[in-house]
Image (cartoon, rainbow, N blue to C red):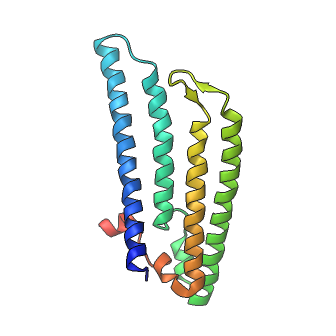
Amino acid sequence: MFSDREARVSRYLKKAEEVLGVVLFCTILVSILWQIVSRYFFNAPPSWTEELSRFLFIYMGTIGVHLAQGDYGHVRIDMLVTAVPAKVRKVMESIILLVCSLSMMVLAWFSLWMAIRKAPIQLVSLGISSGFMYINAVLVSLLSAATTARQLILVLSGRGRDVYSAEPAAAREV
């Protein structure tokens, strides 16, 4: 199992991501409500609310991707993995995690390239570079690559049970 310190840090980081997701969602909600109120009551909707909501929604979605990967619920076909013997399972888990980690590193590279390419273009109503819309993909890709690499190390070191015996968050809550 995880060491006590490692488990605490992991829970703290996961909770921080969840709180950030909630803050982003609430900000999106307030932004959209402000647009509705200003349109119907003042007949002058601000131009920045829709763009801000879209921008924050992208960030909120990428946080969700990393949270799902941390629960090992992002890329997995349980029926196939759990139906095979333990040694085959270890090989399958290792291949899946290696492919996921490499895919995330490739995605980070292309996202960085796209962020640099889009940097000169400004989001008109927010007045910031459109490259910021792609930086989040770089960050979440690198985080997911690190998460899957850590999970791969656990599987290869014989601590795979820490990875693939954990139920996704939705299943634990029921």
Question: Quadrant of the image for the C terminus?
Answer: bottom left
Name the spot of residue 88 as percent of width and height, x first: 62, 86
Q: Is residue 60 left or right of residue 152?
A: left
Q: Residue at x 35, y 47 (%)?
A: 22
Name the spot of residue 109 as percent of width and height, x first: 70, 51
Up/down of 20 relative to 70, above or below? above
Name the spot of residue 123 as percent of width and height, x first: 57, 26
Q: Nearer the viewer, residue 146 or 50?
A: 146
Identity of the residue furthest to the front in this view: 5
Q: Residue at x 56, y 60 (%)?
A: 144
| Viewer can see residue 89 | no
Q: Is residue 174 left or right of residue 143?
A: left
Q: Residue at x 32, y 27 (%)?
A: 33
In terms of image quadrants, where is residue 44?
top left
Q: Is residue 83 left or right of residue 50?
A: right
| Viewer can see residue 14 | yes
Identity of the residue furthest to the top in this view: 43
Q: Nearer the viewer, residue 25 or 109?
A: 109
